[in-house]
Image (cartoon, helix red, strand yellow):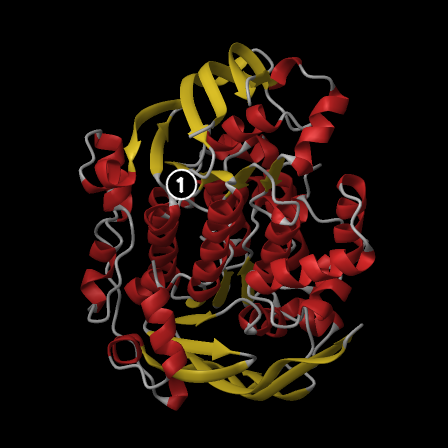
Amino acid sequence: MQELLRIDHLTAGYGANAVIEDISISLHAGEVLGIVGESGSGKSTLLKAIAQIRGLSTEIHTGTVSFETKNLAVLSEGERRRLRGEEIAMVFQYAGASLNPTRRIGTQLAETMRAHTDLSREEIDARAAEVFGGMGFADAHRILSAYPFELSGGMAQRAAIALAVILRPQLLLADEPTSALDATIQLQVLDELRALKERTGTAILLITHNIGVVRHIADRVAVMCKGKIVEQGSVDEVLGNPQHPYTQELLAAVPKMSATHTDCDRMEHMHVTQDFSAITKEKKISDDEDTLLRFDNVSMHFDDAAGRVQAIDGISFSLGRRELLGIVGESGSGKSTVAKLLTGLHTATGGSILLNGRDITHTSGKERRALYTRMQMVFQDAPGSFNPRRSIGAMIGETICRLCTPDARTTAQRVGELLTEVGLPSSYANRYPHEMSGGECQRAAIARAMAVHPEILVCDEATSALDVSVQAKIIALLLHLQREHGMSLLFISHDLPLVSSIADRVLIMQNGRIVEQGETNRVLREPGEDYTRNLLQAAL
């Protein structure tokens, strides 16, 4: 089998600081190598050293990175540009990093095809329909006509993957390519990537925190810890019989599907240790007088280039005080739209949203700002939710000042207390988002949301971009804060095993509708809908 990529004793980093040390791996045509490890272990730095993209590449201190025997570090920028796209493609963790927000998806696709091929417009359209269809898009024409911001996070990520593989590259560098995807679409995309490598011999270097993804598609796996590979071998060898203690810890942190959990053993399912190991949850009450939030036959549509799209279609549900409600569904099912309707980022076109019995559906201005002291949101892309030009402390302080109006000294003290509460040193107030890992950024985002003591915390895929060990710590933190502050949590996720471990009740959404809802134990143990059963079967 032809060797495509060889990395020999690579040490690289940013400036004089080495982030990865003495890395040696190889990758052959048609092979998938999975790389797993905690946030900050050097996984993405390794991909940047291989890709050598201007502005993103790392500085190679020692060692070599060779593609088809060519040393990538000594190639000219023109030679690298020719390789990228035609022979080497990359999928970034966040679609926003690779998609131009001012241009339609179809325009970006046409630019890529024209730059690297002589295909006619008809041939480009035919290949686009084939690739986008393989990524789970039943309406490829609408997606190609859309701007990136008109797509959900999962849909944008699938579009980015389609653009990366449409030229059938020899090597695909994939940095968490399925972290934003629900279980059924994730399986479809993985199967499409597997078909691509079998059909064209494409090799895939896959960075992921999802051990199930590695089991499903990878041939070999390498485990990284603190910039070094501590264990590598076949998937069966490494994941079936891990030898290194760090690998054993990673596997122990993977959430297990639980359809029969009790309130007191949720944390056991998360394998949480350290400060949060003793957390338990109180039994919830479901009486009407204990209902904090209610969606009553809420609908929302929007118009795009392809016509009217019904994002939410007559949904009704409630959220109790101190309750953790999970919302699960495919990408584009309307999960994030629910969060945006609640927080005023979208406006319902029908129905009512009631908070403590008061209609907040069309609030705006001062009335809407007052509501933000009662509800806050933690976004999927934590680094992207912060202003990169301002320090973490300044942005948390801004939230406090806008909604609570304390003096400067009180604000600085409160920022330090919030950072400490989420497990970060108070000195992190002086750091900028790019100076923190993904898990640290997510903790800071939670601290910002907690600044105003909200009654409802909305988590929109708040852990999907995190590796399993960091995810466990963030979940433990959220449950701890819920217990201490008496909050209600609206937890939106495509990770069904995770939701099964922590949620009191769960809503299953499909095509803008709620197809099933109820106590988590009942819904997952005795699903009444085929769609729910399909989600359970697809959970990796």
Residue toward you, 410 or 137? 137
Left or right, residue 158 beside residue 437: right
Rendering coords of residue 97 (x, y %): 66, 44
Tell me what residue is drawn at x 53 percent, y 30 percent.
Answer: 47
Rendering coords of residue 174 (x, y %): 53, 41
Looking at the image, can residue 495 be seen? yes
Residue type for callout 1: Gly
Tell me what residue is drawn at x 49 percent, y 68 percent.
Answer: 456
Circle 1: element type: loop
Residue that badge 1 annotates: 423
Query: In what quadrant of the picture does the C terminus appear?
Result: bottom left
Residue 364 occupies quadrant: bottom right
Query: In what quadrant of the picture does the N terminus appear?
Result: top left
Residue toward you, 211 or 24? 24
Measured along the vertical axis of the image, is residue 384 above or below residue 151?
above
Measured along the vertical axis of the image, is residue 514 above or below residue 186?
below
Tell me what residue is drawn at x 64 percent, y 36 percent.
Answer: 391
